[in-house]
Image (tube, rainbow, N blue to C red):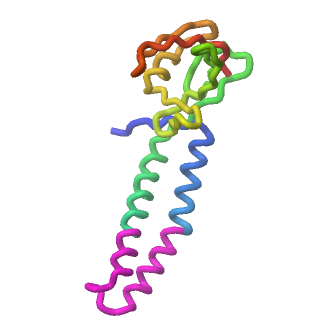
Amino acid sequence: MDKKIYLTKEGLEELKAEYEELTKKKRPEVVERLAEARNMGDLAENAEYSAARDELSFVDGRIDELEELLRQVVLIEEPKAGSKRTVTLGSTVTLHVNKKKEDYTVVGAWEADPAEKKISDQSPLGKALIGKIVGDKVEVAAPAGKVLYTIVSVK
């Protein structure tokens, strides 16, 4: 059974770019290295051959993983101009928390990156925000206790 992988347009482009890099550049380079190492003689004691074979195995595994991901991608729709500002996948939300304003983008789990303020729709905060509108308050349990967020804007 296929599981849907939700990505923004940017996230999809990054995956496609990685796939292209691996299939068109990296894999051919590793295959060439492997062929050169094979020509060096005794394979049992050939560290270069073993390293190239391991790298090829890793690259092929990642290519397979990316192909599977790309088959399951559902593109997150950009919110339409003038639409009701409800938090959905792809929304950028300005939150008021602890006397500060912070912007977060709600993305699918594969694209989440807290350092980039991209939060997963499956995270406690992401789950709490989905479906909410400007002015709503959400409370999220955190290691330091409950944190209250107020939605200031949704883009």
94 vs 60, nearest the viewer: 94
Image quarter where the N terminus lies is top left
| Relative horizontal placement of residue 49, taking residue 26 as reference (left or right) | left
Foreground: 126 or 11? 126
For image coordinates 73% across by 21% down, the residue present is 81
From the viewer's perspective, is residue 24 above or below residue 16?
A: below
Q: Above or below — where is 89 with respect to 28?
A: above
Whole-percent x, y for residue 97 in the image: 58, 15
Total residue callouts: 0
- Residue at image location 67% in from the left, 16% down from the top: 153
Magenta residues, dominant SS class: helix
In percent of width and height, residue 86 lies at: 60, 15
Expressed as whole percent of the image width and height from the top left, the position of residue 137 reads 55, 8
Image: magenta residue range: 26-55
Dividing the image into 4 quarters, which one contains the C terminus? top right
Magenta segment: does it hold 45? yes
Q: Is residue 39 left or right of residue 15?
A: left
Q: Position of residue 116 (x, y in %)?
A: 59, 36
Q: Residue furthest left?
A: 44
Residue in front for this viewpoint, 149 or 123: 149
Q: Residue at x 44, y 58 (%)?
A: 63
Q: Residue 101 appears in which quarter of the rendering?
A: top right
The residue lying at 40 percent from left, 85 percent from top is 37
| Quadrant hosting residue 21 | bottom right
Q: Is residue 74 magenta?
A: no
